Image (cartoon, rainbow, N blue to C red):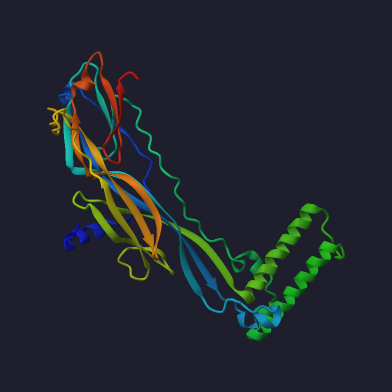
Amino acid sequence: MKFSAKTLIAAALAASIIAPASAQQVQKLSATKANEYGLAYTLPTTVVDVTLEVELTTQLPGEFARYARKYLNASNPITEENRSARLLSATITTHGEADPEQRYVITLKSTQAPFILLTPDGRPLAINTETIASVDKPQLPVSRPAEPTPLQTKAAHQVMTEEMIQSHSTAKRAELAAQQLYALRQTRTDLITGQADQMPPDGRAMELVTSTLDAQEAALVAMFLGTTSVSTQVATVSFTPSADADNVSNIVIARISPTDGIVAADDLSGAPVTLSMKTISRGELPISEKGEPLPFPKGGIAYTIPGQANITVDYEGRKVASARVDVAALGTVYGMAPANFTDKKSAIFARFDPATGAIVITGPKDQ
């Protein structure tokens, strides 16, 4: 299917970085004489969410990088600042948002006080039952800050001698740092072999002393070899499929920058993350015995018969995620007769999918 420039631009604008959704709240509305037994709700449009997890790595050279070979016999110290980003995972999920063009008012007149459960934005969750449909969602990653580098710990200050602080010569400070490093290693060897002049009184004290020495040694080594810090960043971007888009190819939904991680789709500092959608099926109206679409029941309780699409996410020429999802925009709206929910002897309940507006299950009201 060919797309006009207007359609593609609208689709691109529909992709935006969003915040994690809060826990779902529920509002209950009862059909009573006060509201003339009328209940209003709004069917949803389905939004595709892509949660990206990116690993950010920052490498910083140490103050004495050019003396690393001389004092530590190290041939590969970090000599310049470097930042990089790596995509760890991409997870595809969906959620629903109220579609203002799909608002309905139903009349449920009964002495049994029928009721409907709604999301805060008015999407239907259930009728005649306070149990809503369970939605299986994968566990999403969470951002993880970088651990302090050896040079960001107290140990880095503890190993700085007065002579090192006062010296204005980098070469001299490097020599003093190397001497301090050798002395620390000798002290630790003496402790381990039991030859230290003052041994710790017990095992716990020994552990505390050796861990302090280890931290101080790591700080001194970092002054020569540099530091590497790693953090993870998580963000969710969303894309709203439209009813007239059977297939969408390689829409840029975000970018990954080596310096800033996940950035907006129009930020050219990063490599693009693209989304493609291929329609698998469209929702169709039920067919009568004569093979004709059934008409919408008078005063019917509207629900969605969704279509299905395959969503793929690509980055740097490879597919990083794929999922088959139900999509309201690819479906159609049908209805159930209100009498099913108001019959005194055999009233039923219904549970809806909050992401599509489809009916998940129905059954006897008391069940």
In which quarter of the view is residue 335 placed? top left
Q: Tell me if residue 93 comes above or below residue 362 in the rendering.
A: below
Asked if residue 313 is positioned above or below residue 173 in the image, the reply reads: above
Residue 259 image-quadrant placement: bottom left
Which of 138 and 83 lies nearest the eye of the viewer?
138
Q: Is residue 305 left or right of residue 131?
A: left
Q: Residue furthest front?
A: 290
Q: Which residue appears at 67% of the width and 81% of the height?
A: 69
Residue 162, position as x, y percentages in the image:
69, 77
Q: Is residue 67 left or right of residue 286?
A: right
Query: Can you tell which quarter of the image residue 138 is in?
Result: top left
Instruction: Report the quarter where the C terminus lies.
Output: top left
Q: Is residue 143 left or right of residue 358?
A: right
Residue 345 appears at what percent x and percent y?
A: 25, 13
The quarter of the image holding the N terminus is: bottom left
**Residue at position x 66%, y 85% from top?**
171
- Where residue 236 sits: x, y (%)? 37, 54
Above or below 337: residue 166: below
Q: Residue at 59% across / 73% down in the picture?
A: 226
Horizontal side of residue 168 vs 312, given as left or right: right
Which residue in the rendered view is the most extreme toward the top? Answer: 345
Foreground: 187 or 243? Answer: 243
Q: Nearer the viewer, residue 250 or 163?
A: 250
